[in-house]
Amino acid sequence: MSTRSVVVYKAFERFWHWLQAVLIFFLGFTGFEIHGTYAFFGFRDAVRYHNVAAIMLLLLIVFAVFWHLTTGEWRQYVPTLTNIRSQLNYYLFGIFRNAPHPTRKTVLSKLNPLQKITYFGLKVLVIPIIVTSGLLYMLYRYPQQYGIAGLNIESLEVIAIAHTIGAFLLVSFVVGHLYLITTGETVTSNLKAMLTGVEDLADHGTEPDGGAPAPDPVIAQEKAS
């Protein structure tokens, strides 16, 4: 099957991806030190660095949300059940038998069904939990200065538990993500694509859900007319 080099990941997409990765790793590193897992920066500096990195991540999220909405890239993360069983079977068994990928990547469909569900859960559940609990952490006791009783928080216990759960979920995602990097056409093809933006894709169109080849747009237009 012939292939062609295609720009799959745009410049901002790669910038957002790698900066987000750096910030998440740094937040995890400082966060576990704050929890007393080890000592590196020292508690006071770890808290300060953690807060600075958190603000940077919030700003990056704002820009990323704007970019996804204005470019239509948000559609990449809409979950689908099409081919999900085949994709799961591939990850559990097929990949170890050198079986072909059950879905085909295109510029309009970069993620397979399992990836879509995972990223969707990350964006609508894990990230909101971490962001919300983190902001409550950072703003704790500030409302009391102005006597806004309705905003007072009696205890950080629930917030701390939620933030920790979100952090462990994010760590689990990162571990899975690092493994999935190696499941491309070659061990390094996915990593190379996210560095350069270019990937060798099969020379045919696909449906947005990564299924069967899409119909020729010219023929479809002629039939419609």
Image: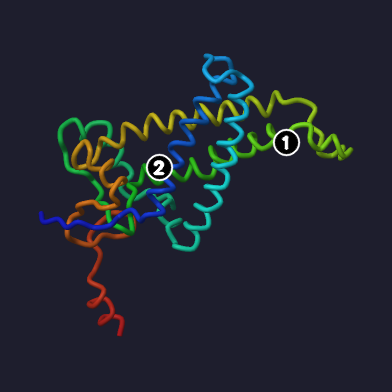
Q: Which x, y percent locates residue 32?
A: 54, 21
Q: Secondary structure at mark 2?
A: helix
Q: Which x, y percent locates residue 10?
A: 35, 56
Q: How is the image coloured?
A: rainbow
Q: Quadrant of the C terminus?
A: bottom left
Mark 1–mark 2 Cα distance, whole angstroms, equals 28 Å
Q: Which x, y percent locates residue 132?
A: 64, 39
Q: Earlier in the sequence, mark 1 or mark 2?
A: 2
Q: Secondary structure at mark 1?
A: loop
Q: Residues within 10 Å of mark 2 (few under 14, many from 20)?
A: some
Q: Which residue is rendered at x = 65% and y = 26% of the image?
A: 160
The residue to which callout 2 is attached is: 18
On screen, 64 above or below 205? above
On the rendered structure, is 220 left or right of 45? left
What amino acid type is highlighted by mark number 1? Leu
**Quarter residue 150 falls in:** top right
The residue to which callout 1 is attached is: 139
Q: Nearer the viewer, residue 62 or 223?
A: 62
Q: Which residue is rendered at x = 41% and y = 45% of the image?
A: 17
What amino acid type is highlighted by mark number 2? Trp
On the rendered structure, is 137 left or right of 212? right
Q: Nearer the viewer, residue 56 or 194?
A: 56
In the image as oriented, which residue stretches furthest toward the bottom?
225
